[in-house]
Image (cartoon, helix red, strand yellow):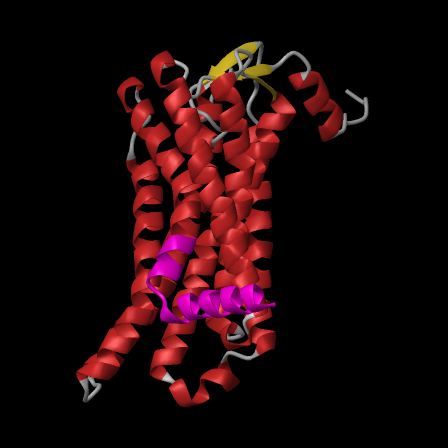
Amino acid sequence: MHHSEPSVFSYYENQTSGVTFILVGFSEYPHLQVPLFLLFLTIYTVTVLGNLGMIATIRLSPKLHTPMYFFLSHLSFVDFCYSTVVTPKLLENLIVEDRRVSFTGCIMQFFLVCIFVVTETFLLAVMAYDRFVAVCNPLLYTVAMSQKLCWSLVAASYSWSIIASFVFVYFTLTLVFCGTKFINNFLCEHDAIVAVACSDPYISQKALFILGTFNELSSLMIILTSYVFIVITVMKMPTTGGRYKVFSTCASHLTTITIFHSILICLYCVPTTKSSWLLVKVASAFYTIIIPMLNPLIYSLRNKDVKDAVKKLMCSSLSS
């Protein structure tokens, strides 16, 4: 055989020319389509306003120009992005009859969701490290968490998530797809795509599981280590007032971490059988739609600095 290797792209074109996916979403509950549409539209509105509001508040308030809020503004940006990758498509599918999505569109959505979810995983770890430095080395905090380091940590989170997402997509594209298939979810996520492949998905699933486990464990290790040191430091504090202040600052972050990681782990550990698809859909809705709404609420309602900054901005805008 002396013919030249076909390019990956031409192979991909040939392989996927006749492939169409139909997103099942919540279509098996026709009576819930309108209530769900209104529910998700409300959640999405709150998500957009909450996250963009958080970014604007942090930008416009000099008092919030600290590493913690720098990371929080990136968390808000990521939340806004992955909610926007998923929710508008879901809203559209709740009101139109035609729920088809092209193969390329599906892979693109999967790729973008991977980028933002992995970035969030590592941003939460970076934020734990930031709290560790703030609590355990308060005098060196501004020196240790320099602007350069903050930008580097954020850039590293984005860069690694892009690399990881390319790997996820590469292994998904090694599968063979054929004809029109029903994707049993409202977004193109790995399990749902793999379930409709026409070839053996073993290697693809294995690769995704190994990389996913690495991401999950490495970020959780950073978080747990940071918080072990924080707890030890807090226990050594002489006054309860100091302890309360530290725990109230960390409470928002711990709430976000607990919700995010427990849902990701739940999605991982659930074997996708017929009966568990509803659970997978609910868990997917949680981490792609509900968490992005909760994060700004958790941080603004629990955080005195943010509340003060918002009040200040509103007063100044009203007076002007």
Q: How many marks?
A: 0
| Residue 160 visible in the current orientation | yes
Q: Position of residue 280 (x, y in %)?
A: 34, 30
Q: Nearer the viewer, residue 200 or 19?
A: 19
Instruction: Assess whether residue 236 is covered by the magenta stretch.
Output: no
Tell me if residue 199 can be seen.
no
* Residue 8 percent across, percent down from the top left: 71, 29
| Quarter where residue 273 is shown | top left
- The image quadrant of residue 235 is bottom left
Q: Position of residue 250 (x, y in %)?
A: 32, 68
Identified at 57% across, 40% down, the residue is 112
**Does residue 61 appear left or right of residue 240 in this picture?**
right
| Residue most extreme to the right | 3
Q: Nearer the viewer, residue 186 or 38?
A: 38
Per the rendered image, the range of residues in magenta is 296-320
Image position of 138 with respect to 52: above or below: below
Q: Residue at x 50, y 68 (%)?
A: 315
- In magenta stretch: residue 318: yes
Q: Is residue 286 left or right of residue 239?
A: right
Tell me the chief SS of the magenta region.
Answer: helix
In this rendering, the answer to whether 58 lies above or below 148 is above
